Image: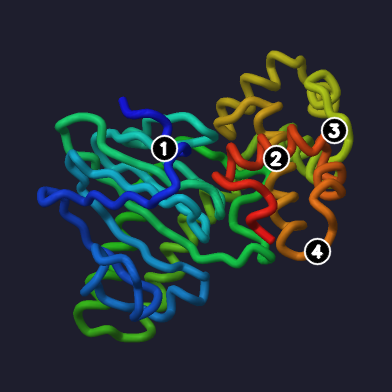
């Protein structure tokens, strides 16, 4: 397998002649050549959706976006492929979905000769706007992609057919609804909800695994198992995720010094903050000013 693409500074777009897809754009103008000619539905922009679609990808399919400007959800229908998550490649197979926050590197590709069939929804979000991804959002989790795919098919069929505004509205609402259902789960373990809401309120606190486990009323090992199952990250890795998302917001909405922001979100030194920030977002914090 090729090296981690975070070392690359250029976008990659390899669709391949054997890949097949259908998509709907939120705006009539899109700079990506592979989406050119797809139908437009401006109602998608009500939820800041840039584009959505269904793709049957075949090798050598590979996409790298150095900095994606919005939340990206991928839900696998059949086959499997890999997505870059938290700096390493994760396999996404049928019955699973992956949710990536805005302003990180977005990389996905086929890894074998079998097709990888998935639905996707790509949002377009400003740095100062609160993204869909929250402290309780899973990065990888179980998800029945068929309902989302059916909503996308219905939207595409209406956009290329009668194009009736009422029908388009309902299909757009369904697409967004299924993303929200995954991104903001109502059935998340109450102990985790309580923990991460508390952590999000005090990111600068010197949180330890033991403290977080105590707050969740479980052992440290049980908290680790719960987080991996429900969110797809270890507790300490998810703590770093929350801190960096908060840092991105502060960089975008304040004039605070980078050293101050690092301290405000819980990093003891600017070097460790810069390293963690670069690993997640692909660029140092100074480049988001």
Q: Do the residues under discs 2 and 1 have CB atoms within 8 angstroms?
A: no
- Name the mark on residue 5: 1
Picture coordinates of residue 78 (x, y %)? 25, 38
Q: Is residue 223 above or below residue 244?
A: above
The local crowd at label 2, few if under 14, some if 14 to 19, many if 20 or more residues have their Cα within 10 Å, is some
Q: Can residue 184 be seen?
A: yes
- Name the mark on residue 254: 4
Q: Is residue 272 left or right of residue 25?
A: right
Q: Do the residues under discs 1 and 4 have CB atoms within 8 angstroms?
A: no
Gap in angstroms between the C-alphas marked 4 and 2: 18 Å
Give the residue number, with chain letter if any, for mark 3. 268
State how the image is colored: rainbow
The local crowd at label 1, few if under 14, some if 14 to 19, many if 20 or more residues have their Cα within 10 Å, is many
Q: Do the residues under discs 3 and 2 have CB atoms within 8 angstroms?
A: no
Picture coordinates of residue 209 (x, y %)? 78, 21
Question: What's the residue at 11%, 48% (across, down)?
Answer: 18
Q: Quadrant of the C terminus?
A: bottom right
Question: What's the residue at 56%, 65% (across, down)?
Answer: 125
Element carrying mark 4: loop
């Amino acid at each position: 397998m090729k090296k981690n693409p975070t070392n690359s500074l250029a976008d990659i777009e390899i669709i391949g002649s054997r890949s097949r897809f259908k998509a709907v754009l939120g705006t009539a103008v899109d700079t990506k050549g592979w989406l050119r000619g797809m139908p437009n539905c401006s109602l998608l922009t009500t939820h800041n959706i840039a584009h959505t679609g269904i793709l049957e990808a075949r090798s050598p399919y590979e996409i790298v976006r150095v900095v994606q400007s919005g939340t990206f959800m991928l839900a696998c229908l059949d086959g499997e492929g890999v997505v870059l998550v938290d700096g390493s490649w994760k396999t996404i197979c049928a019955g699973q979905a992956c949710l990536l926050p805005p302003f990180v590197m977005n990389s996905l590709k086929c890894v074998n000769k079998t097709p990888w069939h998935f639905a996707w929804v790509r949002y377009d979000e400003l740095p100062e706007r609160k993204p869909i991804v929250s402290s309780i959002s899973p990065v990888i989790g179980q998800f029945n992609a068929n309902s989302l795919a059916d909503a996308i098919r219905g939207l595409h069929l209406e956009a290329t057919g009668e194009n009736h505004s009422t029908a388009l509205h309902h299909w757009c609402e369904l697409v967004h609804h299924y993303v929200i259902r995954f991104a903001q789960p109502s059935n998340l373990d109450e102990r985790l909800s309580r923990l991460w809401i508390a952590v999000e309120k005090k990111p600068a606190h010197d949180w330890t695994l033991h403290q977080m486990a105590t707050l969740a009323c479980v052992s440290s090992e049980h908290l680790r198992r719960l987080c991996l199952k429900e969110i797809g990250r270890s507790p300490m890795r998810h703590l770093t995720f929350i801190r960096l998302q908060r840092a991105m917001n502060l960089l975008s909405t304040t004039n605070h010094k980078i050293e101050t922001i690092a301290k405000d979100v819980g990093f003891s030194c600017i070097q460790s903050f810069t390293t963690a920030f670069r690993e997640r977002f692909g660029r140092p914090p100074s480049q988001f000013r």
